Amino acid sequence: MKKFFNLSTREGFGQFVSVAGIFVNLLLSLVKLAIGFFSGAISIIADGFNNLSDMGTSVVMLAGFKIAAMPADEEHPFGHGRAEYLAGLFIAAAMLLVGANLLYSSAEKIINPQALNIDAITLLVLVISVAVKFFLGMFYRHAARKINSEAIGAAALDSFTDCLATGVVILSLGIYLEFGISIDGYAGVFISIFILRGGFTSLKEILNPLLGDKPNQELLDGIKKTVMDAPEVLGVHDLIVHSYGAHRIFVTMHVEMPATLELLEAHEIIDRLERKLQSQFQISITLHIDPVIIGDKSFDEHRELAEQILHDIDSRLSLHDFRIVPYKSGKKLIFDVAVPWNFLMTDRELRREFQRRLIKLHSDDRAIIHLDHQYC
């Protein structure tokens, strides 16, 4: 096995999982299609085509992992990791297509029912197929968790949905054998609904990282804590995370440090933190130094004033990159404000409200505010 797949790498393990899915689904589809065409049961035929589509999605998943394993090049400097997301997107789309086709075929079978040619052996084969598909789903789920793969996670959900689908087929055929009542078409409709539901669920989970969803909170908290643990660090802000696939995460963050630090000393501290974060979280990170004035009475008073005004406007507002410069007979306050999600005021309204409150307290002072809308 190691001769064909490098199981020590994420991409190699993903390729092995994909090939296993190809063989299992191909075997199941051939058996079910043969039984379905012989018996005339639309639910079995539909289930067989569903497994055949699963084999196709495993092929796409295999291609996705192979492309994701390709190194960065001139046209793709961040690598090809997002190819795995595209594979997952194809899987979800295939589930939706199979579900829609099955729904149409099942509706036709309800309108024009036909006699079925089945026996106990048919049911036994289908029961065995459920067991095989269940273990494949468990294998997929274990693999998805092991390498944190959205595409394999979608395949796991599809496999468990298939178990339910085949179970409904078995139930409908059992009723036909025992009572002579054909609910084959209705069983097909029921199966198609579950397949469509699973397709929409997988589609949502795959689209989120493609569109750029919020990074994992545990990662964000871990990065902030590691940096804040450094004694020279006073605060952090403007944390931005870009993901180009698993283990291809690029991070930038501003770090507040005392302005009294020597430039070389501050640079050494930042370099040490970057190396530590890269090793601890397997990320590429760039830290930016923001100097903070300490021990200046006028600076501290104006900063406390600005923080109090912001708190009175909305307790969720916070400032950073604060500095003051002379302005006529007063001071000009220059700073950034971190604006939370679902904040009701526009940028212009917030600036005007802050300015109004500042002038009311300190008529000679003015403010220049840059608004940071949060990405994490």
Image (cartoon, rainbow, N blue to C red):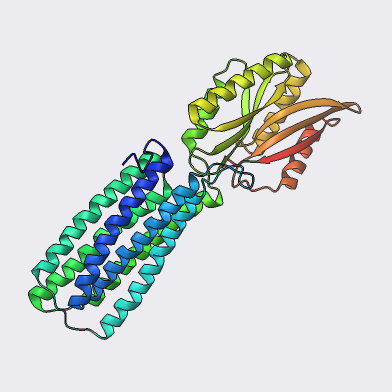
Q: Is residue 276 visible?
A: yes
The correct choice, above or below, for 225 with respect to 54 in the image is above
In the image, 323 versus 222, the foreground residue is 222
Extreme right residue here? Answer: 328
State the image coordinates of residue 356 (x, y, percent, origin top left).
Answer: 78, 39
Extreme front residue here? Answer: 3
Q: Please identify the quarter of the rendering in which residue 353 is found.
A: top right
Q: Is residue 204 visible?
A: no
Please tell me which residue is depicted at 10% across the width and 67% down the height of the picture. 121
Please tell me which residue is depicted at 61% across the width and 42% down the height of the picture. 77
Q: How many marks?
A: 0
The correct choice, above or below, for 246 with respect to 233 in the image is below
Extreme bottom residue here? Answer: 112
Q: Is residue 180 left or right of residue 245?
A: left
The correct choice, above or below, for 261 with respect to 65 in the image is above
Q: Please identify the quarter of the rendering in which residue 310 is found.
A: top right
In the image, 356 versus 164, the foreground residue is 164
State the image coordinates of residue 162 (x, y, percent, origin top left).
Answer: 28, 60
State the image coordinates of residue 81 (x, y, percent, origin top left).
Answer: 51, 45
The quarter of the picture where the N terminus appears is: top left
Q: Is residue 48 left or right of residue 229?
A: left
Please tell me which residue is depicted at 37% across the width and 56% down the height of the picture. 58
The correct choice, above or below, for 79 with respect to 253 in the image is below
Q: Please identify the quarter of the rendering in which residue 161 is found.
A: bottom left
State the image coordinates of residue 178 (x, y, percent, origin top left).
Answer: 8, 73
Q: Is residue 78 left or right of residue 323?
A: left
In the image, 80 versus 304, the foreground residue is 80
In the image, 35 versus 157, the foreground residue is 35
Please tell me which residue is depicted at 42% across the width and 48% down the height of the picture. 150
The quarter of the picture where the C terminus appears is: top right
